[in-house]
Image (tube, helix red, strand yellow):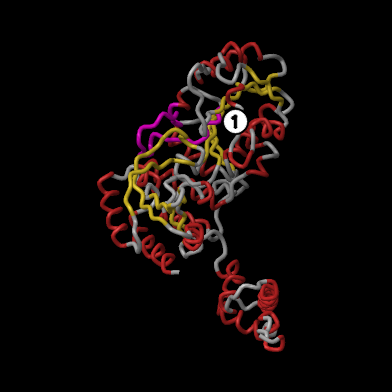
Amino acid sequence: MKEHDAAPDPRSTIPSINRLKEEVAGHLGAQCQNERLVTRLARMVAARMRETPRPQTTADLIREVLAPVTRPGPRPMINATGILLHTNLGRAPLRRETVRSALEEVAGYTDLELDRDSGKRGHRDRHFAALARTLWDVEDATLVNNAASAVCLALAALASGRETVVSRGELIEIGGSFRLPEIMSFAGTILREVGTTNKTRATDYARAIGSGTGCLLKTHPSNYRIEGFTEETDLAALVALGREHGLPVVLDLGSGLSEALTFPAVPEPTIEASLAAGPDVLMFSGDKLLGGIQAGIVLGKAAWIQRLRKHPMMRLVRADKLTISIVCHHLRDLAAGVPLPLSRLATVAPEDLKARARVIRDRLNGDWSLVEDFGFVGGGSLPQERRPTLSLTARFPKKTAFARRLRLGEPGVLGLIHDDRFVLNLSAVFPEEDALLIAKVNEAWRS
């Protein structure tokens, strides 16, 4: 080909900003009447055209650039990983009716911090506290944005500038590389380690108690297990020691399994059993084994909870009105025995799953095999619990590209790649999602 016959650089034919503005406005429709935003988006499209050498239609590129505006926030996903509480997928799935009811209550003005009786300002957690007192027979309760915040707040309020005594075997690391010693340092408390990694006795705690002790801390290792030559101090024994020395005992329960949740028998301490041992402050996550939304739920003795409530850090970590409403509605459903999404997934009958798996396999394009597999609870909970389940697998020459097409669908599908096969684990797929799963897999297959 002669030089003068060379194909023109597609980037030299970029439409004018005015033309792109018309196309952007056409895609947005009535969603946006903001001229300034339309202009900004048109310029972003033009910039992408200059930067992107790969062939792509103007319409596709506009849709890609407009996605944050036309589809704001997290997008729905079908969870075909076999992990029930998948951190990247938002952990526990919520009951839609619960969210709708909660949203309806708080969409307008609410009595969030209004004491209706006196007409004066009240505590924003009083609705939750009243419910928690009823459900768990505790003196008081409060709510923050997550369990790590709850731990930090408790240590800051009860032991800032003083020592917190904790077992070496319970200095946990949670997700995102956040470690308990770092949280303690941020809270202003002094870490006093006792015992060893595998053995800590009540006498170890007792020897560490002195005039500078602020509290005794026990953490439940939700995301790992130490087995073999081990010994840990019983919570009741630690509570007795705290009472003897007039020190609050704080328990970070982690995953927060409730006896009210329909869930297979697992070796995990429940909220109710832990409360019976008498800790002064107990906290756990709202979005793990409790099956609800992200929150840090704190239960305990009124005097200590009041100190948390009055601490300046509470302003930083307090829950918003929507979180409070969803947590309250979720706990009401839990107490009433309403079937929750997490329970549905954890208690599915093997014969029902097998029947669904066969139907899905028969309707998928390609050569899919039905295999026995395992699923996991996930979310830093029950690390040793492997749950028998079924998976669909198929060989793909370009399995990574196939997985990406699935993830980018609406809704997206997140599966697994094992060696040379792509895997759809059905543990966390709801029956009502089966048809969508089939459609999205077949759509990605044809692309």
344 falls in the magenta region: no
Task: Confirm whether residue 381 shows in the render.
Answer: yes
Q: Where on the picture, by quarter, is residue 15? A: bottom right
Quadrant of the frame with the C terminus? bottom left
Residue placed most toward the observer, 187 or 349: 349
Counting from the top left corner in percent of width and height, residue 289 is at: 45, 39
For the point 67% across and 88% down, the residue is 5
Left or right, residue 330 beside residue 31 = left
Residue placed most toward the observer, 343 or 45: 45
Question: Which residue matches tag 1?
Answer: 172
User: In this rendering, is residue 180 above or below 206?
Assistant: below
Residue placed most toward the observer, 378 or 342: 378
Report the amino acid beneath label 1: Ile
Counting from the top left corner in percent of width and height, residue 380 is at: 51, 38
User: In this picture, which residue range is highlighted in magenta?
Assistant: 251-273
For the point 63% across and 39% down, the residue is 177
Task: Confirm whether residue 104 shows in the render.
Answer: no
Left or right, residue 103 beside residue 164 = left
Counting from the top left corner in percent of width and height, residue 214 is at: 67, 22
Residue placed most toward the observer, 365 or 202: 365
258 falls in the magenta region: yes
User: In this rendering, is residue 8 above or below 410?
Assistant: below
Label 1: which secondary element: loop
